[in-house]
């Protein structure tokens, strides 16, 4: 017997300007073996494709109207959670403060952009750097999808919430 999809609608979270990543990861953790995740979002969550792909899920996306998207994440392996055992990349990088990094060659202010534009603009900036150069970006919130993508591309970063409430990240091209 086929198990019903686990449905998660993150559109209300996104419309409030909040980050749904933790809710998505909680849903993934709650899935029964072989169960699919049906995600509803206000945009096509391409960064999430890589994140869940590394955890053993294959995405299938379709626009459902008014700019909203439905994505079905189907498990491709039984035990995909090896990535969950590694430490949080942010903690690892923040702990490397003794390293000397060059001053950023580019400063981006992405605080007023709607998702996924802050991530897209930041990645484009990093790709324009030479090996070892750094870029600083101001973001409206902690960029959890960005961290996964930076790791996949071999880049390093340091970041923290600023007193004003936004997130500042410095990225070193690998």
Image (cartoon, grey):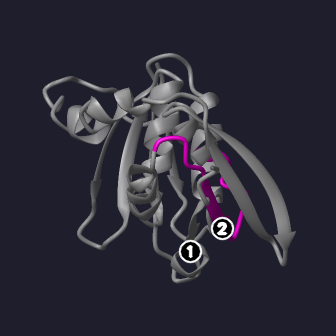
Q: Secondary structure at mark 1?
A: helix
Q: Is residue 52 left or right of residue 80?
A: right
Count up the numbered dots.
2
Identify the mark at residue 14; answer none if there is no mark: 1
> Quadrant of the rendered structure where residue 151 is?
top left
Q: Secondary structure at mark 2?
A: strand
Callout 1 crowding tier (Cα within 10 Å): few <14, some 14–19, many ≥20? some
Q: Position of residue 96 (x, y in %)?
A: 18, 29
135 vs 154: above or below: below
* Residue at image mark 2: 41
Q: Nearer the viewer, residue 103 or 116?
A: 116
Over which residues does the magenta segment extend?
33-47
Q: Nearer the viewer, mark 1 or mark 2?
A: 2
Callout 2 crowding tier (Cα within 10 Å): few <14, some 14–19, many ≥20? many
Q: Residue at x 63, y 49 (%)?
A: 1
Q: Nearer the viewer, residue 119 or 37?
A: 37
Q: Is residue 110 left or right of residue 158?
A: right
Is residue 83 in view from this perspective?
Answer: yes
Q: Residue at x 42, y 35 (%)?
A: 171
Q: Residue at x 48, y 34 (%)?
A: 55
Is residue 143 in view from this perspective?
Answer: no
Q: Residue at x 47, y 42 (%)?
A: 33
Q: Position of residue 63 (x, y in %)?
A: 84, 63
Identify the mark at residue 37; answer none if there is no mark: none
Q: Position of residue 70 (x, y in %)?
A: 73, 62
Residue 136 part of the magenta segment = no
Mark 1 and mark 2 in contact? Answer it, CB < 8 Å.
Answer: yes
Q: Earlier in the sequence, mark 1 or mark 2?
A: 1
């Amino acid at each position: 017997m086929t198990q019903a999809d686990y449905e998660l609608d993150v559109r209300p979270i996104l419309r409030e300007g909040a980050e749904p990543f933790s809710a998505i990861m909680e849903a993934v953790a709650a899935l029964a073996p072989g169960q699919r995740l049906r995600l509803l979002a206000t945009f096509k969550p391409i960064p999430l494709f890589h994140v869940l792909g590394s955890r053993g899920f294959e995405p299938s996306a379709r626009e459902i109207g008014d700019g909203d998207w439905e994505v079905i994440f189907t498990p491709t392996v039984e035990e995909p959670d090896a990535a969950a055992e590694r430490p949080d990349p942010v903690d690892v990088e923040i702990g490397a403060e003794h390293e000397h990094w060059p001053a950023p060659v580019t400063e981006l202010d992405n605080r007023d952009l709607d998702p996924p534009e802050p991530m897209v603009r930041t990645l484009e900036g990093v790709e324009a750097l030479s090996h070892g150069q750094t870029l600083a970006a101001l973001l409206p919130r902690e960029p959890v999808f960005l961290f996964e993508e930076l790791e996949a591309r071999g880049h390093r970063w340091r970041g923290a919430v600023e007193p004003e409430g936004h997130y500042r990240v410095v990225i070193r091209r690998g």
